[in-house]
Amino acid sequence: MKNKKTFYITTPIYYPNDVPHLGHAYTTIAADVLARWHKLLGEEVFLLTGTDEHGKKIAKAAERAGKKPKEFTDSLIPEFKRAWKILNIDYDRFIRTTDREHEKTVQEIIEKVFKSGDIYKGTYEGLYCTDCEAYYTEKDSLNLQCPIHKRQLETLKEESYFFKLSKYQSFLLDLYKKNPEFISPSYRRQEIINRVKGGLRDFSVSRTSFDWGIQLPFDKKHYAYVWFDALINYISGVGYLDKKKQFNKFWPADIHLIGKDILWFHSVYWPAMLKSAGIEMPKKIFAHGFLTIQNEKMGKSAGNAINVGDLVSYAGSDPARYFLLRSTPFGDDGDFSKEALIDRHNNELANKLGNLVSRVSALAEKYGLEKTALKTLDSERIVKKVAGHLDNLEFDKALNEIFSFVDKCNEFIQAKKPWETHDSKVLYESGNAIKDISILLFPFMPETSEKIARTFNFEIELGELKKPLKVSKIKKSEILFERI
């Protein structure tokens, strides 16, 4: 059983068939916010992200680019790492499914499941979407088109090994019943339960039609099917084979953060695979909604993707992080626009937070700070509310609480008029509130929080919320958010 003071969170591993876009950034920023929050709580955190590099989709993209699959993915991995650096994603491991220890882990798990009697040989014939790397029944696909990508499905027939998913129906239903948060948010749970109750079909775990993948240890003609390869990254990435001590410390994962389109694979395939291999279940699968542009799913296939470089060029990294988690309840679909991002940047970040920090620091430089026992701007209630919202992945509500407090601080300054009274106690109380605001904002906007901390001479630590601001010499802050 893992230590309670650890927190293990994962993003999906992304297809490196092009540069990372806004859809990739959305999930990864959310995971980073949670990881940073748990670090503030004093927990030992492991954040895993990476790339899913095997399968037909990547092989086809490489062929179009005139490259070998590994050469093709090697050229794109730096783009993902660069994007996460631009967005201040503080991950602990970037896993690639072409990493040797991952490949060895996949082979070990497949061998284990095979020996348990849960893998058998057969023939697969069915409708397949290469973009999803998923099979569909005729009833799932209107006009034999992929419901996600709106493209014609292929008919595939080949020899394949199958996993006995049908065997795990009662186990899965029992898992969902005993662990209501396993599938989150709660409104996504019933759809999965109904589908599982309707019966489960065994699924294909291998291919012979292409060789860009991991060979099955018991049949070298077959290569692991992408989901049986990809899902295993969550254990290989934290050291299932090569770092047992680390694995035992962090597993089971606290949260697998994913998009709603891959919830079925994570909430049905993955726990059944783990059960077959004798490995403990993750605690929670959280499926968020899509970011759309004009109500169409954003992505390379749809041709409307906004890459990370463009996103950050609009207003900067911290405003992008802020906007994506402020504008839509996490879990629901949300529509993105550059105009809405700039509007929030100007009206909330520049006018409210930026103005508060600028005024207080400028006045504190002029009139100094004098410690006071007054608690007009007491943030204790806000801290509890923010913590509760972040526990529930309610990022928009957490930010709403913080910015309500920013409003209260601005009203306080306006009412007390320290530019007329030169009251250094008012400035101290305002500075103390700014300290608390910036610590609570740190998971969302790390660069901004660190700038504020340098201005007011405090550390970004959760314990600092309970400590009063040190009286020190303040210099006026740089402009945090230039109006656009």
Image: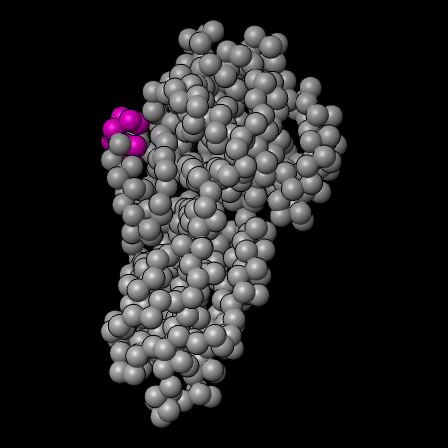
Residue 252 screen position, x and y as percent? 54, 31
Q: Foreground residue, 160 or 13?
A: 13
Q: Quadrant of residue 121?
A: top right
Residue 129 screen position, x and y as percent? 50, 33
Residue sticking out furthest to the bottom: 420
The residue under the point 49% across, 25% down is: 248
Residue 122 screen position, x and y as percent? 58, 12
**Vertical side of 455 occupied by 392: above or below:** above
Q: Is residue 64 left or right of residue 229?
A: left
Residue 220 visible somewhere in the drawing: yes
Residue 387 screen position, x and y as percent? 55, 56
Residue 265 visible somewhere in the drawing: no
**Vertical side of 452 occupied by 165: above or below:** above
* Span of residues in magenta: 64-73
Q: Is residue 68 within the magenta segment?
A: yes
The residue under the point 59% across, 39% down is: 284
The residue under the point 61% across, 21% down is: 275
The residue under the point 35% across, 67% down is: 470
For the C terminus, give its image quadrant. Answer: bottom left
Q: Quadrant of residue 174?
A: top right
Q: How is the image coloured?
A: one colour
Counting every numbered tag in the picture gives: 0
Q: Is residue 467 within the magenta segment?
A: no
